Image (tube, rainbow, N blue to C red):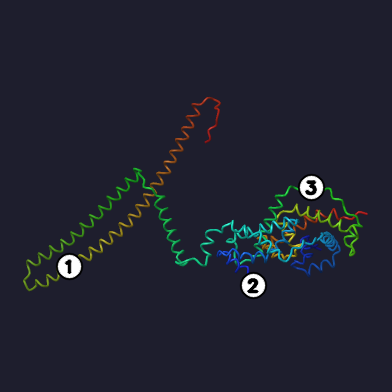
Amino acid sequence: MEDSDAAVVRQVRAGDKDAFRVLVERHSHALFRLAYRMTGNEHDADDVVQETFLRAFRHLNRFEPARSFAAWLHRIAVNCSINLIHQRPPQVERSQSYTPLSTNTLDSLAATTPPPDRAAIHAELQERVQAALGRLSAGERTAFVLRHFEGESIEQIGAVLGVGTSAAKQYVFRGVQKVRRELEPLLRPTR
Amino acid sequence: MKHLSDEQLVFHHYQESDDRHSVEAHLAGCEACRARYQALQDVLSAIPVTPVPERSADYGRQVWQRLRPRLDECPQSFWLRLFERPSLPSPPRWWLAPAMAALVLAAFLVGLFWSRPRTNDPLASRLRQELRQELAADFQSALNRSQEHSSNALAALEARLANDSKAEAKQLVQALHDVLGRARAEDRQMLLAMFHDWEEENAAAYVALRQDLEELASLTDEEMRRARSKLIELAAQASPPDPPFKINK
């Protein structure tokens, strides 16, 4: 029978460092997903995963066994991601230079059969979304990423952010509103 | 008609709405809100969800292999190791509780005496001397009363023995014994009461002494402030009209 996270944590706390391997193997994939969504970069996400487990090991005494170990780990990963994002050189402000996409482009985005240039449009849109996310606060960005991309519930988002459901909802709402303001001029059709 | 808020529309989109049915009913009957909801959906659905790069099934093992050598570099905290290690040799862990309690008590006592240094203040010495004299006087007075009581009882018995017949001598000896016993009991009670009084007076005197000392300290502070102000005034009077520096009051 597979040990629970709390049981493994007790083993590690008792001095069995190798027991930590169970937690690493159990949570690495989910952490990578979250870190990738947060940083938008594959290599950064790998670094975040490493750093998250290292910090978790160092501060394992702070973990309360009654709570979710996954949520605690995700919270550390979010902090690591934010730190890493802050260490990056500032991006060039592009919000005022957005060129609205044409109606044809919007139609092609909605089309079920991708035209040849659809990948390029997606790439551009993706870049602009990342830029928009970069302008959100840490809490807003985390909440938006977890809700929009990962489909996490408000309760789960609150657990990761360490806040209640009302505050988590506010983070999601503010994140959506800001991303929307950034993207709406871009998506406004031109004929 | 009250329209839906942006927040209601956002959480309806994410299926996190608290009142899903009423929002749906409103959207069905309100063209303006329906248009706003459509605009929101257009933006949110246009955000490309790029796939997360694949990681192999043994990604966790790879992470662990890179991580394991680094774990030896970061020791866990002392307290964690102390409390969580199951193989802690005897004595068992229960000894920690009384040991910690003893440690706390020792720290408290050290703090208690360390923070209350003996003072050579003349007022304190005078108060201590007065207290000692009062206690000595009380003790002497109580002792005198006790001796007087016993002496009176003995004198009365001696007088009766001289006048009464031999037949009554035995009864008188017994009476003497009883009287002495009662006197001893009364003396004991009186001494206990006296010590109780001394104890109370001592505590009261100690409180009074503390108050006097605090008052003295505050007076000293006040005098210091006054002296400092005086010095500043004197310095201001003695200084040239435009001093090269400012004195902070």
Q: Relative to A124, say whether A70 is above or below.
A: below
Q: Is B98 on the left or on the right of A85, as rendered?
A: left
Quadrant in which residue B10 is drawn: bottom right
Chain letter for mark 2? A
Q: Position of residue B6 (x, y in %)?
A: 78, 60
Amino acid type, callout 1: Val
Chain letter for mark 1? B
Q: Residue at x 77, y 69 (%)?
A: B20
Q: Position of residue A80 (x, y in %)?
A: 67, 56
**Mark 3: which secondary structure?**
loop
**Mark 1: which secondary structure?**
helix
Q: Which mark is residue B11?
A: none
Q: CA distance from mark 1 to mark 2?
A: 88 Å
Chain letter for mark 3? A
Amino acid type, callout 2: Glu
Comparing labels 3 and 1, the label whose residue is closer to the camera: 3
Q: Relative to B57, say whether A177 is above or below.
A: above
Q: Position of residue B17 (x, y in %)?
A: 75, 66
Res A189 visible = yes
Q: Position of residue B158 (x, y in %)?
A: 10, 64
Disc 1 marks which residue?
B179
Q: Which mark is residue A93?
A: 3
As drawn, which residue projects farthest toward the top? B240
Res A170 visible = no
Q: Quadrant of the N terminus of chain B?
A: bottom right
Crowdedness near tag 2: few (<14), some (14–19) or many (≥20) residues, C-alpha within 10 Å: few
Q: Are the residues flagged by discs 3 and 1 from a single subunit?
A: no
Comparing labels 1 and 2, the label whose residue is closer to the camera: 2
Q: CA distance from mark 3 to mark 2?
A: 50 Å
